[in-house]
């Protein structure tokens, strides 16, 4: 068993519990306070959906990068890493625009329980995407050296685990927060 | 003799020359383990002084030794300190020191992450205690129930310090948990299969899984509380804004109950090492002890609401959680029987370590029994928030965890330092602890049934309350003297203690195969592991365990 992969899997389990409970809190407040109409009224699933596609696609580009790495195609890896970072950054820009729009419509973290639980949940996810981007940038920087990639294939793979995790969490959050209002 | 597997050798890390620096910059699991344990012991003394201040205030009715505000801060800090700054770190420190030795590894899987975990503990602890100088320590109890902990009701910055430092400590604990799991699963020496692991390592494995899965529940609660307090959020605010104070309790105890087992399972591990060695018998029912631990670990996630019977969750929930809580008594009882069966017919040596282990068996069982009474929710309603709870939790955490830690200290001190602790002072230490502990807490059962609320600053002179409290306070100071004897014992033995051989107790696990204290690389050669007692096999080549099907 590779110790680095195992450690990342355990870290993801821990983080998964963290997000699971944040999502549970969101659902709990949605059920007890009837904040559903607010969500339906102020959120734009289509626009956020388009930005979400960027994040979902970035998991694919990450995987293509890992495939290149396994074939020792380091230039390919670097290309796909850049693509992944750009897609992830686009998602964050989208989230920033959404937050700005919500603040302009006076939906804030302190206004009501919808605002509090929405910004906490999506904000923590955004923070994790940001940290993932930092990790990928480090991989890209180190990946400029062939020696690093030849010796530390695992490092990039472990980073990709984390990136997929951030992506999967968003699948759940997007479904619960944005799509559920239509069900 | 088999060589250490290459995978257990991390990259060589140069050691700085200076002595102080060699500790501060250390990534060696033994040094970090010692740092963990000494830091924990320091905070144990802080928490102990806080306990004595409380008992001094409560010695007589209508006493004004402490102000109500100071009393609130002190009981909050006592609970928080003993759980997060003594209980967890002392057990993580012990695991840090022992697990690599017990599995024949050179170090933990991630030595630098290990140092990071320790320094998070160190600075997290400092941050918590800094609150005394920054406008007041936290003052709403160690579980900081909302909405009392919310901004409108508690403007003290102490609660912000409490939440922030617990986040810091929580991150450190998760990192330590991951590190220990990976170490146990990937760095075992050849022959050390999962079914041959020393039980202490088994308990550490299950505890670490609990840490990794339970601490996030606390972290979620803490960030939500901070968002409420600092950004004006509405999570736990009054119902008018849509918040829910009950959610705090659910999340807190979803962490808090596994936490009880995070503090108890390593203690079980210590007992499972100490009792066989001083009974001169192999452990009875190894498989049952390991399997019942896994059962406890799983059940511990399903019983949190037994801390919330007074909330009024509804009868079906109360019944379900009462049943679940009683179920836990079964795997725990299995262990108690296994330890007693190990002693049965053994040639018992009453060293201080063994005395503490036997004390653990008795007092932990008493705490467990009062726990079962609390699972019966009508009884819980009656004694909720009284001294009966205080008595129960101290029988489990002091009579259980702390007694086990002392058993472990007397047992492994020779390995840590190369010197034996004095048995003469040890006997004084043990008997004073037994007398002090029981005098303090046994009477609190009665106080609770008489209705004395916990966390109350003072009390009226009702029948028996004065005398029972006085007895309890006298007991606390006897306990204080017992701890002083322990400090003297450690101090004197470190300088003048009898030199310890590699294996002074005639034990059988791998940590005793190396010198006392072990060299930086732990082992030159690890003895072959063909059974659960590799050192027995080494000493008795004519009658090894693996010949008897115990492999």
Image (tube, coloured by chain):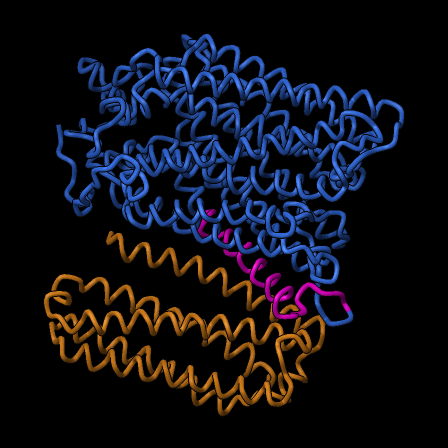
Chain colours: A orange, B blue
Q: Residue at x 18, y 26 (%)?
A: B527
- In the rendering, at what x and y percent does residue B155 appear? 70, 58
Q: Nearer the viewer, residue B466 or B235?
A: B466
Q: Is residue B384 visible?
A: no
Q: Is residue A35 left or right of residue B274?
A: right
The secondary structure that most of the magenta stretch takes on is helix
Seen from the viewer's position, the closer of residues B19 and B214 is B19
- Left or right: B141 as drawn, with respect to A56: right
Residue B345 position in % (x across, y down): 44, 9
Task: Indicate the position of residue A23 as horizontal and vertical percent values.
Answer: 55, 68
**Residue sitting at the far bottom:** A46
In front: B281, or B221? B221
Q: Residue at x 36, y 80 (%)?
A: A88
Q: Which residues are magenta?
A: B210-239
Q: Nearer the viewer, residue B404 or B237?
A: B237
Would you say residue B221 sits in the magenta stretch?
yes
Q: Is residue B63 left or right of residue A61?
A: right
Q: How many marks?
A: 0
Q: Position of residue A157 (x, y in %)?
A: 25, 66
Q: Is residue B97 above or below residue A92?
A: above
Q: Is B421 inside the magenta-drawn segment?
A: no
Above or below, B48 against B10 in this view is: above
The C terminus of chain B, quarter of image: top left
Task: Assign the N terminus of chain B to one quadrant of the image.
Answer: top left
* Residue A139 visible to the viewer: yes
Residue at x-position 70% and y-position 28%: B55
Query: Residue B443 occupies which quadrant of the picture?
Result: top right
């Amino acid at each position: 068993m590779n110790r680095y992969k195992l450690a990342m899997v355990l870290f993801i389990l821990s983080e998964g519990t963290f997000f699971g409970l944040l999502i549970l809190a969101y659902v709990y407040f949605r059920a007890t306070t009837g904040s559903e109409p607010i969500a339906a009224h102020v959120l734009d699933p289509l626009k956020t959906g388009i930005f979400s596609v960027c994040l979902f696609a970035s998991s694919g580009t990450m995987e293509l990068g890992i495939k290149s790495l396994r074939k020792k195609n380091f230039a390919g890896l670097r290309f796909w890493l850049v693509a992944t970072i750009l897609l992830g950054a686009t998602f964050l820009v989208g989230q920033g625009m959404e937050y700005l729009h919500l603040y302009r419509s006076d939906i804030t973290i302190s206004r009501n329980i919808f605002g509090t639980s929405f910004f906490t949940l999506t904000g923590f996810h955004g923070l994790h995407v940001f940290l993932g981007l930092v990790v990928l940038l480090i991989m890209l920087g180190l990946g400029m050296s062939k020696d690093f990639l030849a010796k530390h294939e695992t490092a990039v793979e472990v980073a990709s685990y984390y990136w997929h995790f951030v992506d999967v969490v968003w699948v759940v959050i997007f479904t619960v927060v944005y799509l559920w209002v239509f069900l | 003799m088999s060589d250490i597997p290459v995978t257990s050798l991390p990259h060589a890390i140069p050691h700085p020359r200076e002595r102080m620096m060699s500790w501060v910059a250390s990534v060696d699991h033994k040094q970090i383990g010692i740092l963990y344990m000494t830091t924990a012991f320091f905070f144990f003394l802080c928490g102990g002084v806080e306990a004595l201040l409380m008992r001094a205030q409560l010695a007589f009715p209508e006493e004004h030794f402490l102000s109500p505000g100071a009393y609130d801060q002190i009981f909050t800090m006592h609970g928080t300190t003993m759980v997060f700054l003594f209980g967890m770190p002392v057990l993580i420190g012990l695991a840090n020191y022992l697990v690599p030795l017990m599995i024949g590894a050179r170090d933990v899987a991630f030595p630098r992450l290990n140092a990071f975990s320790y320094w998070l503990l160190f600075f997290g602890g400092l941050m918590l205690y800094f609150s005394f100088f920054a406008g007041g320590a936290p003052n709403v109890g160690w579980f900081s129930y909302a909405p009392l902990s919310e901004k409108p009701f508690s403007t003290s910055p102490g609660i912000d310090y409490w939440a922030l430092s617990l986040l810091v400590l929580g991150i450190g604990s998760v990192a330590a948990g991951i590190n220990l799991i990976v170490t146990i699963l990937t760095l075992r020496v050849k022959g050390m299969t999962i079914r041959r692991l020393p039980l202490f390592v088994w308990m550490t494995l299950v505890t670490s899984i609990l840490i990794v899965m339970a601490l996030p529940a606390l972290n979620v609660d803490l960030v939500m509380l901070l968002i409420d307090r600092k950004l004006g959020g509405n999570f736990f605010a009054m119902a008018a804004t849509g918040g829910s104070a009950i959610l705090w309790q659910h999340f807190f105890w979803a962490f808090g109950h596994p936490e009880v087992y995070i503090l108890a399972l390593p203690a079980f591990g210590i007992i499972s090492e100490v009792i066989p060695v001083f009974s001169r018998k192999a452990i009875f029912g190894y498989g049952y002890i390991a399997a019942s631990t896994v059962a406890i670990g799983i059940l511990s996630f399903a019983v949190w609401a037994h801390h919330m019977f007074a909330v009024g969750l509804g009868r079906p929930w109360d019944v379900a959680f009462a049943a679940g809580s009683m179920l836990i008594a079964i795997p725990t009882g299995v262990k108690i029987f296994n330890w007693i069966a190990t002693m049965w017919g053994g040639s018992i040596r009453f060293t201080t370590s063994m005395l503490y282990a036997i004390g653990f068996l008795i007092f932990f069982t008493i705490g467990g029994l009062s726990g079962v009474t609390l699972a019966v929710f009508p009884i819980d309603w009656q004694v909720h928030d009284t001294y009966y709870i205080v008595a129960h939790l101290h029988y489990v955490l002091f009579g259980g965890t702390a007694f086990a830690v002392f058993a472990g200290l007397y047992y492994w001190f020779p390995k840590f330092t190369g010197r034996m602790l004095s048995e003469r002072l040890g006997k004084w230490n043990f008997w004073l602890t037994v007398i002090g502990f029981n005098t303090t807490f046994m009477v609190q059962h009665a106080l609770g049934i008489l209705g004395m609320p916990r966390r109350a600053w003072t009390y009226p002179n009702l029948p028996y309350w004065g005398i029972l409290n006085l007895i309890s306070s006298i007991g606390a100071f006897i306990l204080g003297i017992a701890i002083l004897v322990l400090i003297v014992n450690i101090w004197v033995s470190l300088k003048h203690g009898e030199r310890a051989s590699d294996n002074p107790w005639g034990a059988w696990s791998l940590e005793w195969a190396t010198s006392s204290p072990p060299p930086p690389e732990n082992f030159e050669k690890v003895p072959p592991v063909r059974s659960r007692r590799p050192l027995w096999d080494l000493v008795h080549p004519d009658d090894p365990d693996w010949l008897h099907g115990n492999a």
